[in-house]
Image (spheres, coloured by chain):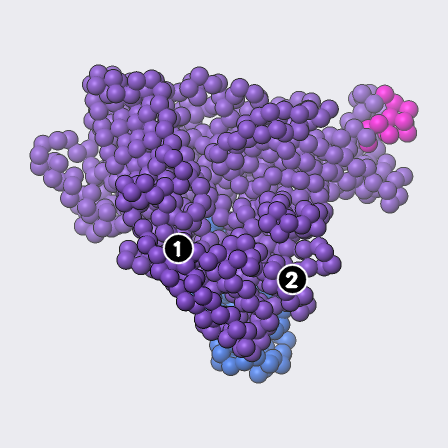
Chain colours: A blue, B purple
Amino acid sequence: MKLVINGDEHEVDAPVGASLAAVLRERLGLTGTKIACNEGHCGACTVMIDGVPVLSCITLAHSVEGEVTTIEGLRDHPLVDAFVRADAVQCGFCTPGQVVSAAALVAARPTPTEEEIRHAMAGNICRCGTYPKIEEAILHWRD
Amino acid sequence: MARLIRTEKEVEGRFEEVWLVVEEDPLEQWPAGPGEVVGRPAVRKDALERVRGEARYTADIRLPGMLHAALLRSPYAHARVRRIDLAPALALPGVRAAIGPGEAPGLDAEAGYAGAPVAAVAAETDAQARAALEAVDVEWEKLDAVLDPEEAVERGILHGEPERYERGDFDRAVAEADVVVESTYRTQVVLHNSMETHQSVCEWIGDRLDIHTSTQYVWGVRAEVARELGIAADRVRVVCEYMGGGFGSKNSAGEYTFAAAELARRTGRPVRCALTRREEHVAAGNRNATLQRLTVAARSDGTITALGGDFINALGWGGWSAATEGPLKMLYACENVRTTRSTAKINTPPMKAFRAPGFVEGTFGLECLIDELAARLDVDPLELRRMNYASSNDGTPFSSKNLAQCYERARKHWDRRHAVRARSDATWKRGVGMASQIWYGGGGPPSYAWTRVGSDGRITVVTAMQDIGTGTRTAMAQIAAEELGVPLDRVEVTLGDTARGPYATLSAGSSTTPSIGPAVRAAAADAKRQILEIAAQRYDLEERILDIRNGTIVSADGNLSVGLAEFLELLGSAQILGKGARGPNPTGMSVLTFGVHVVEAAVDVETGEVRVERVAAVHDVGRIVNPLGAESQVEGGIIQGIGHTLSEQRLMDEETGRVLTTSLDAYRMPTIADVPEIVCEFVDEPDAHLTNLGSKGLGEPPIVPIAAAIANAIRDATGADVHELPVSREEMLRALREAEKKERRGAPAAV
């Protein structure tokens, strides 16, 4: 199959049924996308397809039609610096997924309210409880 | 000078007498308050790579030729493998090796819980390994399983003998008291649910075993693996630079490590063994359930005269029995105390330490009981706590205790309660509750650190500790920068590799900063002394008038001001090396942490829904190294505690002992939408008796009082006593009905 990831086209050989997350991590070495539950409950594996956040661990790689953006494609996004400054990272395992979800949010709503942030980010679990700082990072992402 | 001492060592509230080699700690503490770097907010040294997804966790390790292992687990709560045939699994595509009971530590023929590992398979892919598990042919002999902790206690199926403690004359004090309150509390099993599941990658290189593992204690894993495999400890290298959460569940090697090591040995290839989320919910440890039958007796003036507790720790097949009675013994001045703790051995998954084990559970019971007493006496709950303040730990002085100051600072939050209650309406009742926190967190020796100063004036701190997400890497850099007089951006920290640094203690028990921080400071001071010695020679000045400030060597007489990098250029590629050790804890003193939480909660009396609206936390943990990171720790502990209090519960089928809540939609942890307003304050006063730093640990304290503070806010709002965690809607409605009945009988339901 062919996948467009972070602007680059990749020819990938993967068994039918492989998840997008597995292809990103195991075939392409893009390990910034984390797998924490592998069944679509925690948000750690969030990537964007044509700007829409999706759970890559329950997305079949062969069904992907649009352009995929992973955390590797967002490394220079202002949200990265906002997360760093706000201390919106503890163990950091969920953080790439948080950043991807936040990037999709601010692309659609550049000045999200607290309510909008809580609504858009509620699917990304952080066991360390970094949420207040994540909210702060997103509120001030352009400062 | 090195000294050999016999001392009590504390980890997670467990004490043991040990011989320790310690070094003197001759450095004076810095004055209280912020320094140049320590005490000022610092962005994490490793934030960028974690946020950008560049940090390489154990889950990201991919070694050439690596195989994937999966564990076969018992479907029965108690069973024995009578016969096992691995051949059908070995015949499947991609399968390279399989091992059964007795072939690796942790794989036992007797399975003590549903989910206990008995065999393992390694294959080219994870899917092949898991498919091969299905093919293993096992003949099970089912054994008698005990799943009810009270039944286990009745039948004497225990881990060890019951622990008994008594001081004073409990019975007499109860008989003579004006008021006696007895209540029973239950806490549930909760799961750590680290985002990175338990996992290891093992590779043999000659006779050396390299282990990449998601752990809180690289040295502990090294020692355990060397001991179990009968190889020299220096033939085992354990690496964990980035770690995706542990919360107490990753303090030891685990069967996944041993299975990977054995399968790697048999195949001559690296082997990865990673638990799935569903396995994580079954076999990665848990906070055990407790049953607490508590008694408090008091005089009508509010003086507590007796405290008693019968505790059952429902431990499961393994783990250790945490001191659930600890808060009851230590939090209040009380001459007559009697406790018994029985530890039920039941056929459920093993307990592992979980963020202040025992004290989270015990504080829920005790601090709810104190509020029930306050209601009975018609005394303000804050005043009742202040009246019964403990000025010593049953005669042993505290190294420092500023709980009174915490109460004082909490008062402005407590005073909001009239306004909060007034915001109640017909369905949503609002109230305010408080609870106190006591816990360990002093750390201890031994731990060591090195510093390496380059000719560019940059410093590397080298110590084989862990940063499990708490920000300890940053704290260590701040301490070294402060001591050496350089800006924080000139300091890096190398950690997480037993082959690349000296011994440092485990990252558990709120001990990393108080244990390793003083060693880092000593190592920085050693390097600084050497730099000033050679500067004195180079510029022909007296060493005692030299200092380093903001990266510049200066003399007190104002004649010298030379940049560190400029001066050290003479080193070329050589380096200045410093070394430091953690000194001893103060003898004859109790080193403890303290705090208070004040919670504002709302209860929907029609549906039983509980919302936490505001939490104010005031903690006394000695000197704060990084106020920004410390605030994050407090917020995280509170949020995790809100989950424990309101929504999290591992459910088990009472017939079969199988865990039912195996996924993250069944086991409900807090999301960003559940977070209340959090106000975080620190007393920030160095413990004058504790090390050259005066800092205690902060990882655990914030999760200790939150459940009781929420329960007490619920009582304030509704008059209902909740006695069981989690406070599900069902439990809330039950408590409301109970309160109504009480009111009809004419007893006062609320304060």
Residue contact at pointers 2 and 1, CB within 8 angstroms = no
In magenta segment, residue B540:
yes
Which residues lie in the magenta part?
Answer: B531-542
Q: Where is residue B621 in the image (x, y as percent from the top left)?
A: 51, 31
The x and y percentages for residue B179 are 21, 22
The chain to which mark 2 is attached is B
Q: Main secondary structure of the magenta part?
A: helix
Say which quadrant the C terminus of chain B sits in. top left
* Residue that carries the numbered disc 1 in the rendered image: B113
Q: How crowded is mark 2: few (under 14 residues within 10 Å), some or many (20 or more)?
A: some
Q: Which amino acid does label 2 sit on?
A: Arg
Where B391 sits versus B263, above or below? above
Q: Specify the quadrant of the image occupied by residue B314.
A: top left
Q: Do labels 2 and 1 share a chain?
A: yes
* Badge 1: chain ID: B
How packed is label 1: few (under 14 Cα within 10 Å), some, or many (20 or more)? many
Q: Which of marks 2 and 1 is nearer the N terminus?
A: 1
* In-front residue for pair B648/A118: B648
Q: Which residue, as the protein is rendered here, is positioned at the far left?
A: B745
